Amino acid sequence: MKPLSEQLSDLADRAKQAEDTVDAAQAKNRAALESQRERLKSSISAATTRTQADTTAAQEEMQSWWDETRSNIHDRFEELRAKRDEHRAERDLQKAENRADDAELDASDAIDFAAYAIDEAEYAVVDAVIARADADDLALQQS
């Protein structure tokens, strides 16, 4: 497992890539956007494998899935915080090491989830810009 600082650095790099994609979209660089969209498809596929999420759900199920996922993640982190609060008084080194390892794994999972969400958002932006460009091209052809 990568150190948390390295995972956060990777997440920052992915956020920067999403920002660059939006810049390319504003510049209407279609070739770059289509290339970026293909890269994102691969990245999303890898993230899906890591998180074992069912991303093939229908569009109308997406909001329900997102609400449930967010609630589950929130509940899990609340549970972890409560456990951590209970164990603060304990001084057993091995237990403290195990809890620290678990906390780091939870942080790593949260970073992976954030990266997945950034990829999905970036893909949606690229897809929307390409759809708008297609609509504009069609409007020009029909006028």
Image (cartoon, rainbow, N blue to C red):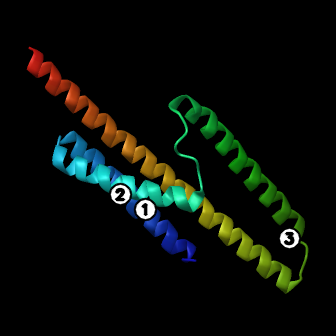
Mark 1 and mark 2 in contact (Cβ < 8 Å)? Answer: yes
User: Rounded to the nearest whole Å, what is the CA distance between mark 2 and mark 3?
Assistant: 37 Å
Circle 2 sits on which residue?
16
Q: Residue at x 56, y 55 (%)?
A: 113
Residue 42 is left or right of residue 3, and the answer is left
Which quarter shows the C terminus? top left
Q: Residue at x 78, y 59 (%)?
A: 81
Circle 1 sits on which residue?
12
Q: Callout 1: 10 Å neighbours few (<14), some, many (20+)?
A: few
Q: Residue at x 43, y 62 (%)?
A: 12
Query: In the displayed image of the protein, which residue is found farthest to the bottom?
Result: 93
Q: Residue at x 66, y 69 (%)?
A: 105
Visible residue check, residue 40: yes
User: Rounded to the nearest whole Å, what is the CA distance between mark 1 and mark 3?
Assistant: 31 Å
Q: Amino acid at mark 1?
A: Ala
Residue 31 coordinates in the image, percent (x, y): 17, 48
Q: Secondary structure at mark 1?
A: helix
Residue 128 coordinates in the image, percent (x, y): 32, 34
Q: Amino acid at mark 2?
A: Lys
